[in-house]
Image (tube, grey):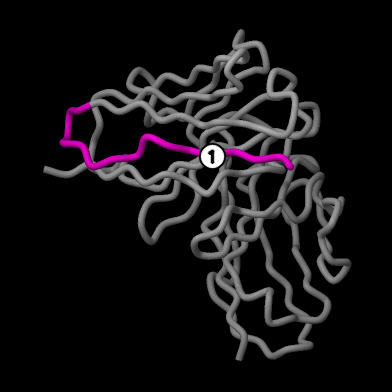
Protein backbone atom coordinates (compact mmCIF):
# COMPACT_ATOMS: atom_id res chain seq x y z
CA UNK A 1 0.00 0.00 0.00
CA UNK A 2 1.10 3.58 -0.62
CA UNK A 3 1.79 5.30 2.68
CA UNK A 4 1.26 9.06 2.81
CA UNK A 5 3.11 11.02 5.49
CA UNK A 6 1.93 14.54 6.19
CA UNK A 7 3.95 17.17 8.00
CA UNK A 8 3.50 18.89 10.23
CA UNK A 9 0.66 17.11 12.02
CA UNK A 10 -0.28 20.40 13.70
CA UNK A 11 0.46 24.01 13.00
CA UNK A 12 -0.58 27.30 14.52
CA UNK A 13 -0.37 30.44 12.41
CA UNK A 14 -1.68 33.98 12.30
CA UNK A 15 -4.18 35.54 9.94
CA UNK A 16 -2.39 36.51 6.77
CA UNK A 17 0.45 34.02 7.20
CA UNK A 18 1.62 31.79 4.38
CA UNK A 19 1.11 28.15 5.38
CA UNK A 20 2.63 25.09 3.72
CA UNK A 21 1.71 21.46 4.36
CA UNK A 22 3.78 18.61 2.94
CA UNK A 23 2.64 15.16 1.89
CA UNK A 24 5.24 12.50 1.10
CA UNK A 25 4.35 9.23 -0.60
CA UNK A 26 6.17 5.95 0.05
CA UNK A 27 6.23 5.36 -3.69
CA UNK A 28 5.53 7.46 -6.74
CA UNK A 29 1.90 8.40 -7.33
CA UNK A 30 2.55 10.58 -10.41
CA UNK A 31 0.13 13.51 -10.01
CA UNK A 32 -2.75 11.48 -8.57
CA UNK A 33 -2.70 13.40 -5.32
CA UNK A 34 -5.69 15.20 -3.84
CA UNK A 35 -6.18 17.58 -0.92
CA UNK A 36 -9.28 17.86 1.28
CA UNK A 37 -10.35 20.15 4.09
CA UNK A 38 -12.28 18.67 7.00
CA UNK A 39 -14.12 20.67 9.64
CA UNK A 40 -15.85 19.12 12.63
CA UNK A 41 -19.46 18.25 11.90
CA UNK A 42 -19.19 19.12 8.23
CA UNK A 43 -18.72 17.10 5.06
CA UNK A 44 -15.12 17.00 3.78
CA UNK A 45 -14.39 19.54 1.06
CA UNK A 46 -12.32 18.89 -2.07
CA UNK A 47 -9.66 21.56 -2.52
CA UNK A 48 -7.06 20.38 -5.04
CA UNK A 49 -6.88 17.42 -7.43
CA UNK A 50 -4.29 16.25 -9.91
CA UNK A 51 -1.74 17.64 -7.44
CA UNK A 52 -2.25 21.23 -8.56
CA UNK A 53 -5.73 21.77 -10.07
CA UNK A 54 -7.93 23.98 -7.94
CA UNK A 55 -11.47 22.64 -7.55
CA UNK A 56 -14.15 25.01 -8.76
CA UNK A 57 -15.27 27.44 -6.07
CA UNK A 58 -12.18 27.02 -3.88
CA UNK A 59 -10.50 30.33 -2.98
CA UNK A 60 -7.39 31.21 -4.98
CA UNK A 61 -5.29 31.43 -1.82
CA UNK A 62 -5.14 27.63 -1.91
CA UNK A 63 -2.62 26.01 -4.24
CA UNK A 64 -0.99 22.63 -4.69
CA UNK A 65 2.24 21.47 -6.25
CA UNK A 66 4.44 18.42 -6.64
CA UNK A 67 4.63 15.11 -8.42
CA UNK A 68 5.97 11.64 -7.78
CA UNK A 69 6.54 11.39 -4.04
CA UNK A 70 6.53 14.93 -2.66
CA UNK A 71 3.61 17.32 -2.65
CA UNK A 72 2.67 20.56 -0.96
CA UNK A 73 -0.53 22.40 -0.15
CA UNK A 74 -0.05 26.13 0.34
CA UNK A 75 -2.44 28.69 1.78
CA UNK A 76 -1.01 32.01 0.66
CA UNK A 77 -2.77 34.18 3.23
CA UNK A 78 -4.41 32.32 6.10
CA UNK A 79 -8.01 33.28 6.87
CA UNK A 80 -10.13 32.54 9.96
CA UNK A 81 -12.32 30.11 8.02
CA UNK A 82 -9.24 28.03 7.11
CA UNK A 83 -9.08 26.57 10.61
CA UNK A 84 -9.54 22.88 9.84
CA UNK A 85 -7.75 19.58 9.33
CA UNK A 86 -6.24 18.97 5.89
CA UNK A 87 -5.73 15.54 4.35
CA UNK A 88 -3.88 14.39 1.28
CA UNK A 89 -5.12 11.34 -0.64
CA UNK A 90 -3.58 9.23 -3.39
CA UNK A 91 -5.68 7.55 -6.05
CA UNK A 92 -2.77 6.22 -8.13
CA UNK A 93 -3.38 2.66 -7.01
CA UNK A 94 -5.63 0.59 -4.79
CA UNK A 95 -6.16 0.75 -1.95
CA UNK A 96 -6.81 4.45 -2.02
CA UNK A 97 -4.99 5.93 0.98
CA UNK A 98 -5.01 9.16 2.97
CA UNK A 99 -2.35 10.97 4.90
CA UNK A 100 -2.64 11.28 8.65
CA UNK A 101 -3.90 14.85 8.52
CA UNK A 102 -2.61 18.30 9.44
CA UNK A 103 -4.58 20.35 11.91
CA UNK A 104 -4.34 24.08 11.23
CA UNK A 105 -5.10 26.41 14.12
CA UNK A 106 -5.45 30.18 13.99
CA UNK A 107 -3.36 31.98 16.60
CA UNK B 1 -28.15 20.89 -5.60
CA UNK B 2 -25.91 17.84 -5.42
CA UNK B 3 -26.60 16.06 -2.16
CA UNK B 4 -25.66 12.82 -0.42
CA UNK B 5 -27.39 11.74 2.76
CA UNK B 6 -26.19 8.73 4.72
CA UNK B 7 -28.33 6.75 7.14
CA UNK B 8 -28.34 3.48 9.04
CA UNK B 9 -25.60 4.09 11.57
CA UNK B 10 -26.32 2.53 14.95
CA UNK B 11 -24.90 0.90 18.05
CA UNK B 12 -24.23 -2.77 17.30
CA UNK B 13 -22.54 -5.57 19.20
CA UNK B 14 -19.27 -7.11 18.02
CA UNK B 15 -19.99 -9.80 15.46
CA UNK B 16 -23.21 -8.10 14.42
CA UNK B 17 -24.36 -6.70 11.09
CA UNK B 18 -25.52 -3.35 9.81
CA UNK B 19 -26.49 -1.92 6.43
CA UNK B 20 -25.73 1.70 5.63
CA UNK B 21 -27.53 3.64 2.94
CA UNK B 22 -26.65 6.78 1.02
CA UNK B 23 -29.37 8.64 -0.83
CA UNK B 24 -28.19 10.73 -3.76
CA UNK B 25 -29.98 13.66 -5.35
CA UNK B 26 -29.27 16.55 -7.68
CA UNK B 27 -27.19 14.59 -10.21
CA UNK B 28 -27.39 11.55 -12.49
CA UNK B 29 -26.34 8.94 -9.94
CA UNK B 30 -25.90 6.17 -12.52
CA UNK B 31 -23.04 8.08 -14.20
CA UNK B 32 -20.66 8.08 -11.24
CA UNK B 33 -18.38 5.77 -9.32
CA UNK B 34 -19.20 5.99 -5.63
CA UNK B 35 -17.17 5.45 -2.47
CA UNK B 36 -17.43 4.80 1.24
CA UNK B 37 -14.85 6.50 3.47
CA UNK B 38 -14.71 6.28 7.26
CA UNK B 39 -13.18 8.19 10.14
CA UNK B 40 -12.68 6.48 13.47
CA UNK B 41 -12.90 8.68 16.60
CA UNK B 42 -9.80 10.84 16.86
CA UNK B 43 -8.30 9.27 13.74
CA UNK B 44 -7.83 10.19 10.11
CA UNK B 45 -9.79 9.33 7.01
CA UNK B 46 -9.76 5.76 5.67
CA UNK B 47 -11.11 4.73 2.27
CA UNK B 48 -13.32 1.64 2.61
CA UNK B 49 -14.68 0.68 -0.80
CA UNK B 50 -15.84 1.89 -4.18
CA UNK B 51 -18.20 0.73 -6.89
CA UNK B 52 -18.40 1.42 -10.60
CA UNK B 53 -21.31 3.43 -11.97
CA UNK B 54 -23.06 0.26 -13.23
CA UNK B 55 -22.09 -1.92 -10.27
CA UNK B 56 -19.87 -4.16 -12.38
CA UNK B 57 -16.65 -3.45 -10.46
CA UNK B 58 -15.96 -3.12 -6.75
CA UNK B 59 -12.83 -2.54 -4.70
CA UNK B 60 -12.20 -2.81 -0.96
CA UNK B 61 -9.54 -2.01 1.60
CA UNK B 62 -8.03 -5.26 2.91
CA UNK B 63 -9.36 -4.78 6.46
CA UNK B 64 -12.99 -5.14 5.30
CA UNK B 65 -12.65 -7.68 2.49
CA UNK B 66 -14.96 -10.63 3.04
CA UNK B 67 -16.95 -8.75 5.70
CA UNK B 68 -18.31 -5.66 3.91
CA UNK B 69 -20.18 -5.49 0.61
CA UNK B 70 -20.76 -2.33 -1.36
CA UNK B 71 -23.74 -2.18 -3.70
CA UNK B 72 -25.97 0.30 -5.45
CA UNK B 73 -29.48 0.62 -6.86
CA UNK B 74 -29.41 3.16 -9.66
CA UNK B 75 -33.20 3.09 -9.98
CA UNK B 76 -33.40 4.32 -6.38
CA UNK B 77 -30.35 6.64 -6.57
CA UNK B 78 -28.92 4.82 -3.60
CA UNK B 79 -25.60 3.43 -2.44
CA UNK B 80 -25.28 0.77 0.27
CA UNK B 81 -22.70 -0.78 2.54
CA UNK B 82 -23.56 -4.13 4.09
CA UNK B 83 -21.30 -4.66 7.09
CA UNK B 84 -21.04 -8.12 8.67
CA UNK B 85 -18.86 -9.56 11.42
CA UNK B 86 -18.39 -6.09 12.84
CA UNK B 87 -15.44 -5.37 15.09
CA UNK B 88 -14.70 -2.62 17.59
CA UNK B 89 -12.20 -1.16 15.12
CA UNK B 90 -15.02 -0.60 12.62
CA UNK B 91 -16.40 2.10 14.92
CA UNK B 92 -16.37 5.27 12.84
CA UNK B 93 -18.30 7.92 11.03
CA UNK B 94 -19.01 6.53 7.57
CA UNK B 95 -19.22 8.93 4.62
CA UNK B 96 -20.38 8.27 1.11
CA UNK B 97 -18.56 10.25 -1.55
CA UNK B 98 -18.96 10.79 -5.26
CA UNK B 99 -16.01 10.35 -7.62
CA UNK B 100 -16.32 13.28 -9.98
CA UNK B 101 -14.23 11.77 -12.77
CA UNK B 102 -12.83 8.26 -12.38
CA UNK B 103 -10.21 8.87 -15.08
CA UNK B 104 -8.73 11.49 -12.74
CA UNK B 105 -10.38 10.58 -9.47
CA UNK B 106 -11.40 13.05 -6.85
CA UNK B 107 -14.21 12.93 -4.33
CA UNK B 108 -16.08 16.14 -5.02
CA UNK B 109 -19.23 15.60 -3.02
CA UNK B 110 -19.54 14.01 0.42
CA UNK B 111 -22.39 13.37 2.79
CA UNK B 112 -22.44 14.47 6.41
CA UNK B 113 -21.73 10.94 7.60
CA UNK B 114 -23.45 8.36 9.78
CA UNK B 115 -21.97 7.03 13.02
CA UNK B 116 -21.44 3.31 13.50
CA UNK B 117 -20.52 2.20 17.00
CA UNK B 118 -19.46 -1.40 17.61
CA UNK B 119 -19.52 -2.15 21.30
CA UNK B 120 -20.94 -4.62 23.79
Q: Residue A106: x percent and y percent?
A: 62, 85
Q: Which residue is mark 1?
A: B5
- A6 left or right, relative to A19: left
- Does the magenta segment cover residue B3? yes
Nearest the viewer among A34 and B17 is: B17
Identify whether A65 is placed above or below A78: above
Nearest the viewer among B102 and A72 is: B102
Q: What is the secondary structure assignment of the residue under circle 1?
A: strand
Residue B59: quarter of image: top right
The part of the chain drawn in magenta is B1-16
Q: Residue at x 86, y 52 (%)?
A: A56
The quadrant of the rendering that contains the C terminus of chain B is: top left
Identify whether A34 is placed above or below B85: below
Farthest residue, direction left: B120
**Callout 1: residue from which chain?**
B
- Does the magenta segment cover residue B17? no
The quadrant of the rendering that contains the N terminus of chain B is: top right
Q: Residue A75: x percent and y percent?
A: 78, 73
Q: Residue at x 42, y 19 (%)?
A: B69
Q: Residue at x 74, y 81 (%)?
A: A79
Q: Residue at x 71, y 40 (%)?
A: B2
- B55 left or right, relative to B88: right
Q: Residue A82: x percent and y percent?
A: 68, 74
- B6 left or right, relative to A46: left
Amino acid sequence: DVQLTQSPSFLSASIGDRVTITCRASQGVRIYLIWYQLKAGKAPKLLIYGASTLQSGVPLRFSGSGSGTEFTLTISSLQPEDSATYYCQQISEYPVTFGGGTKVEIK
Amino acid sequence: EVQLVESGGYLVQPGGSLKLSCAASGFTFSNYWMNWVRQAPGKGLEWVANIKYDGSAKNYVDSVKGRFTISRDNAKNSLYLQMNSLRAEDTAVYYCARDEDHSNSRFDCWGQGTLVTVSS
